[in-house]
Amino acid sequence: MPRPVRRSAALAPLLAAALTAALVPAATPAPAAPRAGLPSYISALSSVRYEGVGDDLLTAGLGFSGLRSATPPAPADPDRPTAAELRRQAIWASAGLYAGPGGGLGRLYGPNVDRGRPVPGDGKVAGVEYRAVAGSGSHSVSFVVQVPDDFDRSRPCVVAAPASGLGGVYNMVGTAGAWGLHRRCAVAYTDKGMGPAFDDLHSGTVMAYDGTTGPRAQTADRAAFDAGLSDAERARFDAERPYRVAYKMAHAKTNPQASWGRDVLRSVELALALLDRDWRRGAPRAGYTPATTTVIATGVSNGGGAAVAAGEDDHGGLIDAVVASEPQMNLAPLNGIRVTQGGRAVPAAGLPLIRYGSLASLLQPCAALTEPTAPGYSSLDTAAAHRRCAALVGDDPRLISRRAAKRAGPDGLPRLAQEALVRAGYQPQSSYLQLAHYDPQTPASYAMSFARASVADSLCGYGWARTDASGAPVPYRTAELAAAFGTSSGRAPAPGVLIDENSPGGPVADARSQGPDGRHDYNLRGESCVYRLAFNKAPRAEGEWAARLAEGLDATRRTGDLHGKPALIVHGRDDTRVPVNHSTRPYLGLNSRAQHGASTVAYVEVTNAHHFDSTAPGYDNRYVPLGYYYQQALDLMWQRLDGRGTLPPSQVVRTVPRGGEPGHAPDLTPANVPDIADRPAAGDRVRITDGTVRIPG
């Protein structure tokens, strides 16, 4: 097993590189090499060597000082950024150091902190970066493999880091990538077949695999995504609904989440093949194989779910361990597995995101009225929110019953909506975060993905477009489309938004949608449609879509069987994006059952932590960063694989918020974020007995 090595000697190669910087370009294409020996599914491969001064693997030549800049690196020509400029923007965004150190990022944890100490120098890491593609077009998956010059060939390791969210292939460079490079490991990234690829149906602009954009006809087989419409269909669609944009996750018609585990495993296979081909000097006699190379699959949110999926899909011992933070997982039926908190059964557990997300979207505008100090409340249309409250009253037991509404009266409906969210499995204290997490485009896009819908289907009356000040769709600017690889979260290129195609006054931004009476209602019509499809309660006209969605969803479910691999998962108790009751808590039970009671998963639940480590006012004084514990979890798993320790028992870590006034919280200190305990107190231990996952209160 590899031994952790500190990068105190990392300055030596940087100084040597600096002496020749005038003679050696910052990034030089590696000599063209044959694809012999690479996996057969790789359809394209290129490589670049970064000498570690003008450009590098970890900071894209910016150094830690440049990553701290509040202004993203700008391309020379915003309408035609180069692939290198887009890569630099994506890596800058992945590090997040521009957020400032008050919340601990860049000071207690982050790409410039290793084992609690600052990394020497400016962080630049010399090495070779490979970019590869499997498949083509809508079926394509992008990979990047980074091998540092000081890669430990005698005790090799690979960190597989799938992108979080719908992010691009460089999404994890500043987190798992930095951690792996600091340990002289190769790092294998994948966008999981999602990423920021788009097709602007009006201008015909698409994104190539390297992030550059251009006309669809010219980009041709280099396009990472195409909406799949004929020229006649495109012209007709644009005439009827001008300026719309399709994006890969929602409109590829491939259900990419079903292949997350496969994609992570392929990234590892590619990394091992490249190492075996190009890094043989000083390598183990048997080469780089699963037997000679330590492999950790790790990720955050969707990437965490992908790492878990890879652990389950790995039947050949390719992966040694899994580390995940707040993993988004659609679980198999629990079939008797129960979850308790503080000795009481939780109201609901094990729902997939499409279900709890579509339910939350219906309830959140109303429930938000209970928290007037919450982030985003100033932009809430309170009149529309009250109308949503009234619309929730009916016979659906998941919403607000007529009897309860009659007792509570109109003023009590927001409280009943919040109680419905708790019944749906959200933590009671999540009420403060519900409005900030109101995001109907997430369940809408997952519905399209699972149902394998085309952009032309406009499922549930939804589309995406850039809009003007009135909310009407308008054409994208060239620079906005060109920047998508570095700026997009994986949805429509910024500043594109969700469109209600069926608003009575004509298509408009969903945030301005009107109901039948002509008043804004947060698009009850569209959200109700997604909710019906998600819970398979659709009328006959929608029945085929509901069946397709259910089939696609079932292809993504996780069983808990990691085949004995050790795993360490951290999750924030207050997570409102991926609630603990629908993700890690019940997954513990599934894993315990799959392992016949001997669970291989260690679970750390962190109080006062949620899905995003924002330090904005209202978050800064209430929450601690989960990223701090993610980095600690990687360290603990490294020690476990190196034989220098065991994984900690499953536990609740009780943190201390920073306090103070919103926007003026004191700096985070180690006292706010106690370490994961080797021997947690009995009252903090998470236990699994008789099919019940028992979480301390």
Image (cartoon, rainbow, N blue to C red):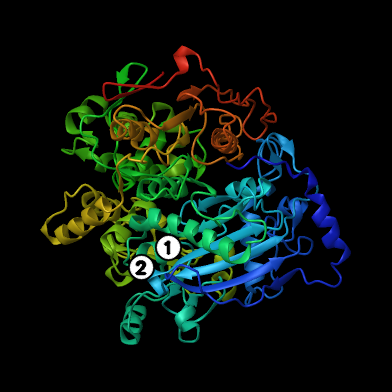
- In this view, the residue in front, 617 or 200, is 200
Instruction: Give the label, 1 or 2, closer to the camera.
Output: 1
Above/below status of 659 relative to 455: above
The numbered mark, 1 or 2, whose residue comes first in the sequence reads 1
Q: What secondary structure is found at the residue carrying circle 2?
A: loop
Residue type at the position of mark 2: Ala
- Quadrant including the C terminus: top left
Q: Position of residue 10 (x, y in %)?
A: 77, 49
- In this view, the residue in front, 40 or 82, is 40
In the image, farthest residue toward the left: 540
- Quadrant including the N terminus: top right
Q: Residue 193 bears which disc, if any? A: 1
Q: Position of residue 83 (x, y in %)?
A: 62, 72
In the image, farthest residue toward the right: 19
Q: What secondary structure is found at the residue carrying circle 1?
A: loop
Picture quadrant where residue 24 is located: bottom right
Say whether residue 695 is left or right of residue 295.
left
Above/below status of 373 relative to 2: above
Q: Residue 252 bears which disc, if any? A: 2
Residue at the (29%, 58%) spot, across then down: 450
Distance Cα–Cα, label 1 vs label 2? 9 Å
Label 2 neighbour load within 10 Å: few <14, some 14-19, many 20+: many
Q: Position of residue 407 (x, y in %)?
A: 22, 24
